[in-house]
Amino acid sequence: MKPLGTITMYHKFITIDDKEIIDRIAAESENYQEFVNRLGEYVGTKDVSSELAHMAIIHAWELRETKVIDKITSKYGEDLFVKPWTYPIRTKSDRLASSHHIQDAIELALYENPSDWIKMNLFLLKAYALLLTVQSPVALDNAKKLLETSPDLSCFRPYIHHIECRLIYEQEGNLTKVIPICKAGLKLALEDGNLYQAIWLFRWLGMFTMNTDPHLASKHLEEAYNLTKSLGTPFHTAAALIDMGWVYVILGEYDLALAFYDEARTLSVSLDEVSDRNALVLSLIYCDLDDAQQALDWAEWALEWHMNHGSEGDSWIHAIMARALTLLGRLDEAAEHLDISREHAFRSGQEREVALFYLVSGIHETVSGAPATAIETLRRALEIFERIKTQEYTNRTLLALVHAEIKLFKLEGGDETSDSSGQWMTYLEDVARSMNLPGILIQHSLLKAEFHIAQERSVEARETLIDALDIYNSPGVRSLKDQVIEKIREIDTKSKM
């Protein structure tokens, strides 16, 4: 493999003997993933310096290589400069469960007054692993102060920028402050050849911009994906695919999103990393495409996964189950899941969970024949999703509001000459055009045609659908275009009767 700044950044801190070991293993490896595995195997079976064991555990921890971490831990787990990296922190619950152990292990290691570069790694671990606690900003400040007094540690600047942008985002959600920090860190990482950190920073730039400029976000995430492939890191390849799928859902390019999530799921299975997350996302997308049966199949898979892990599921799972069941017309079963979702959502106090409950409740009310009530419920969901800037769910809520408007027109009547079902159809189009969301524009056209059909204006409905076929030419909107073509055929068939 070519020299990689993620590895060579440590060369100036270690002995010649350790450097020779690192260089030899790097030369024998095709990519970063293989290097980490080979280094872990070497350290786990040889008597090496504490510094080399420290480096090995950090590289394995960065790639979330639990088997390699276990291998190193079995031999050097009690080493003070290894132990802090032996605790799981992959999820928020992991971090909360491990936080005290990590903090104690870091304090013991710092008490030994290690070299500055090891001290820097300890500060950065504390800032990252304890991100949900008050300890994180203190540790990050300590890392910055150490950098000021030790210019040799400049190779750690991308890590400091990475953690700082994460910390500000978690605490304030202030993208105006976060994005410049993220960009600065990315520039430094690329200059240093630290491509592993560049993956993270490209991903975060993608996630920070997807709700305001999904087209730009897709470019950042494609860069991250390409780097994961070149470094041979499947865990992060799967993560980048999931991020890209998220962006294409926002764009309404559901077929591309499904392709990304399917590839991510295949990778996750090979890594033994399967969870409910992918299944829930797939359920949501199939509902977006009106394929309720596939949506239900994936939601049931997620619920079964939770039950096999000793849980009845959370508000998300039951809301997503309710959405699929509602679209299938199984309203009583859907209502049961909504009751469970409501209980979990309001108990948690998480706005996103409450908003999803409102969204699915509104869809259920529309299908149940109460569109006026549904509109009020969906407005609550929209207020939350727009405030917390979650465009994926903002789109879903606006589409649901237009469905409710059309249902209300069908039940109560209205202006037979209007080109819009109401304020929500107009607002949906404005959002889709201003953000250039091609799939959402096609869905808007499908709904507009449905409204015209309800007005008994089949000619205008057909014209709207014909125009929709020219909105965007991409494999990402294939299923939506199929729906458009099918609607045109239905209109043509009825006109001949």
Image (spheres, helix red, strand yellow):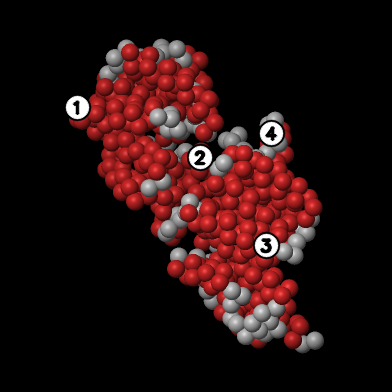
- Rounded to the nearest angstrom, the CA distance separating label 4 from label 2 is 28 Å
> Label 3 amino acid?
Thr
Which residue was labeled with disc 1? 149
Q: Residue at x 67, y 59 (%)?
A: 363
- Rounded to the nearest angstrom, the CA distance separating label 3 from label 4 is 33 Å
Mark 2 or 3, closer to the camera: 3
- Decide: is 208 above or below 161: below
Q: Residue at x 45, y 12 (%)?
A: 78
Question: Along the horizontal axis of the image, is 413 left or right of 107?
Answer: right
Q: Earlier in the sequence, mark 2 or mark 3?
A: 2
Which residue was labeled with disc 3? 373
Q: Earlier in the sequence, mark 4 or mark 2?
A: 2
Coordinates of residue 428 in the picture (x, y in percent): 54, 68
What count of labels does the image hold? 4
Which residue was labeled with disc 4? 311
Query: Are there few (<14), some (14-19), or many (20+) residues within 10 Å of tag 1?
Result: few
> Label 1 amino acid?
Thr
Report whether residue 263 is seen.
Answer: no
> Label 2 amino acid?
Pro
Which residue was labeled with disc 2? 234
Closer to us: 227 or 105:
105
